[in-house]
Image (cartoon, rainbow, N blue to C red):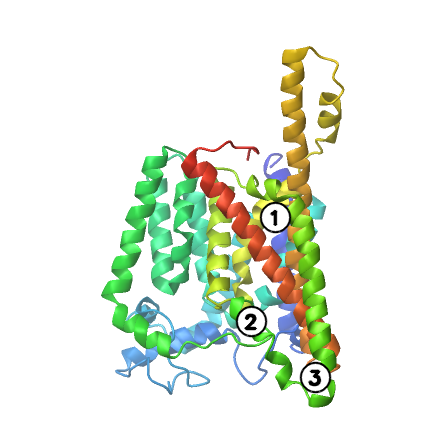
Amino acid sequence: MSAFWPRFRWPLALASGALLVLLTLVAHGGGWAWVGVEHFADKPYFLDLVAVLAAGQAQAAGLDPYLPPNPFDSFGRPHVYGPWWLAGGPLGLMVVDARWRGPLLARAFVATAAAVLAPRRPAAALVALALLASPPVLLGLERGNNDLIIFLLLAAAGALLARREMLGGPMGAVLLWLAAGLKIYPVAALPMLAARAGPRGRALARVAAAGAGCAAVFFLWRADFARAARHQPEPDTIFAYGLGVVRGMAEWPERVPAVARAAAVAAQWVAFGAVLAGAVWFFGRRARALWALVPATGATAAWFVAGGAAWCACWLANTNYPYRAVLLLLPARLWLERALAADSGHAAHSASSGQAENGAGNEEKGNAATGELRDAARTVSRRLLLAAAAAFWLTPAKAALLGGPYAALAAVVGAEQALVLALTAALAVSLAGWGWRRWAGGQVFLSE
């Protein structure tokens, strides 16, 4: 008990806090609007889970789940995912099973996310709660979206990859393969398999084998994936994230009444430019810390690569629906660790005093450089956490301003998209730095 409590008390507090927020919103249905989540009072909870179960039920009933309308779904929606999700039909699962599967999925996700984030201090737990209970993540929980299942698979894969047992690598690869077969986009997380300690050649073989397995799935079920893609909705609203959303910002003010259009356009681009310029200035000065941020191997590295790579791929493909923010909980583990790392300023000051002889002096200079880099990594990690929390908590402001004033709404949208763009670019730099060190054998500046 003495060893358990200090290690798990803050993750337990984080999970309890997130579940308390969720239960409060369920108990007071009007509260969903306060956090910018559209809740259908006349529809059941876990609507996305209902859609998946309805597709399986339709197939079991002899209907084509890819053709609308589906009589078992609340909105008559066709199936828009891969064929493996239809396995619920042969297993006897029906729409009514969402009543117990939804809460089970929500609890499993919250518990796993708390274990991944693993805060060790009260401040870290509060920051983690701001991410875990953010509006986009709450939307995923309210809908029972299957991105929660992808998160569970990627989190389990990262944990397995870090284990020393012989089957850790193969089992981690199997879980990643399963995730990619379910949603396609996790194929971008294939490099996470290289985060398992061992020779680079073996890591490359593991990535190649899993990639071949994913390609085989996409080829064998290509007709089903193609049919699902015909009905795939596009995230072209201001409540989404992606390259297409940023490009569409130039057209979005056309939906604003003409009398307020000029002010909305100006406010949007001023906010976008100001936030993006500040981010470029801040992170540009600390690009070396971003490059060296991710450890070469281990569970933390695997989670960072999985979540960061999948997020960047979805952002570029413009398929980042709000609830896909759950992916950023995986790299947030490393940001929390770095943000609350011990201060190395004293070591850097000591090393710069120049009291030692040449040999010792050179060693101390190296220690000072490492200390400065760790300080920069801590500062960068704090800003990344702040950027993520700020971007996701702007959702309630967008929802509240939909009816005007439009200049304020446009400014919020511009600031939010700039924050997400900066966050995505920072992830890309960190991923590139990790890849260079892992594959080219570059110097590892920061230990895990």
Residue that label 1 marks = 11
Q: Nearer the viewer, residue 424 or 90?
A: 424
| 3D distance between C-alphas at marks 3 and 1 | 47 Å
**Is disc 1 in contact with disc 2, using a CB cutoff of under 8 Å?**
no
Task: Judge the density around disc 3: few (<14), some (14-19), many (≥20) Cα neighbours within 10 Å.
Answer: some
Task: Judge the density around disc 1: few (<14), some (14-19), many (≥20) Cα neighbours within 10 Å.
Answer: many
Instruction: Please tell me which of labels 3 and 1 falls first in the chain.
Output: 1
Residue sitting at x 55%, y 51%:
427
Give SS at disc 3.
helix
Residue sitting at x 44%, y 46%:
158
Type of the residue with mark 3:
Arg
| 3D distance between C-alphas at marks 2 and 3 | 18 Å
Give SS at disc 2.
helix
Question: Of discs 1 and 2, which sits in the foreground?
Answer: 2
Residue that label 2 marks = 247
* Image quadrant occupied by the N terminus: top right
Type of the residue with mark 2:
Arg
Question: Where's residue 289, x and y in %?
Answer: 61, 40
Give SS at disc 1.
helix
* Image quadrant occupied by the C terminus: top right
Residue that label 3 marks = 261
Type of the residue with mark 1:
Pro
Question: Of discs 3 and 1, which sits in the foreground?
Answer: 3
**Is disc 2 in contact with disc 3, using a CB cutoff of under 8 Å?**
no
| 3D distance between C-alphas at marks 1 and 2 | 39 Å
**Residue 361, quarter of the rendered image:** top right
Judge from the rendering whether residue 23 lies leftward or rightward of residue 149; answer left or right: right
Say whether residue 397 is visible: no
